[in-house]
Amino acid sequence: MPTLYTADRCPYAARARIVLAEKRIAYEAVEIDLDDRPAWIYEKNATGRVPVYEEDEGLVLPESEVIMEYLEERYPEPALWPADPAERALGRLWLNRFDDRLGGAYYAARRSDEGRAELDRRLAELDDALEGQPYLSGREFGLADTPCARATGCIGRAPSAVPPMTLSTASTANGMYMTGVSRACS
Ligand SMILES: N[C@@H](CCC(=O)N[C@@H](CS)C(=O)NCC(=O)O)C(=O)O
């Protein structure tokens, strides 16, 4: 059985956990204390960061995007990238730029009420992106949606002091998307 070295509070590890769950892959989760990391984690990932995915046969992969892409190729069903190359490329851009487009504003808003206006502006941009399609890479929930899935708090444990992304000012398209994302990883 594969092992995922993970941390509940890590949004990158959450992306890998969502993909493992979507693909119904049984795995052992090993929680790493990020404030007191074991020395051996550096043997698996020179940066000492989580997530790290490991197979019994010896494959060891750090970096959430590398892990997700590997799982997508190794376990093609259900497909989490669309077949259309353009939709896939735009989805990859969402994954690559999530922190710039939404994640940074989301975490700033969690730290201070003053960040809420910027988050609302970014959520409006999410609305625009979802104008003609239900998910960020097209017609189905996919890898591009995994950061939003984490931000809504629908998987893993968000720090208890901090609520998940709230949608009080978000429009219908955004709300529908978030509902869909939550359903996809429930
Ligand atoms: N680019 C990495 C980022 C992973 C990352 O930043 N993990 C954080 C926890 S969320 C970590 O392990 N931080 C410990 C450190 O940087 O020393 C990925 O996508 O996997």
Image (cartoon, rainbow, N blue to C red):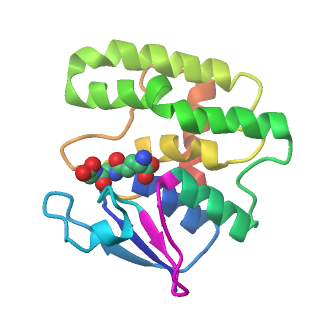
* Residue nearer the viewer, 7 or 116: 7
Residue 96 at x, y percent in the picture: 55, 36
Answer whether residue 54 is magenta in the image: yes
What residue sits 14% from the left and 57% below the top?
35
What residue sits 71% from the left and 38% below the top?
137
What residue sits 57% from the left and 39% below the top?
95
Relative to residue 172, is residue 69 depicted above or below?
Answer: below
Residue 7 at x, y percent in the picture: 31, 61
Answer whether residue 151 is magenta in the image: no
Direction left: furthest residue? 36
* Residue nearer the viewer, 108 or 65: 65
> Can the viewer see residue 87 in this picture?
yes
Residue 78 at x, y percent in the picture: 74, 63
Q: Is residue 175 left or right of residue 32?
A: right
Q: How many numbered badges does the structure rendering display?
A: 0
> Can the viewer see residue 136 in this picture?
no
Relative to residue 16, is residue 65 depicted above or below?
Answer: above
Which quadrant of the figure has residue 88?
top right
Relative to residue 120, is residue 91 depicted above or below?
Answer: below
Chain part drawn in magenta: 52-64
Relative to residue 177, is residue 185 depicted above or below?
Answer: below
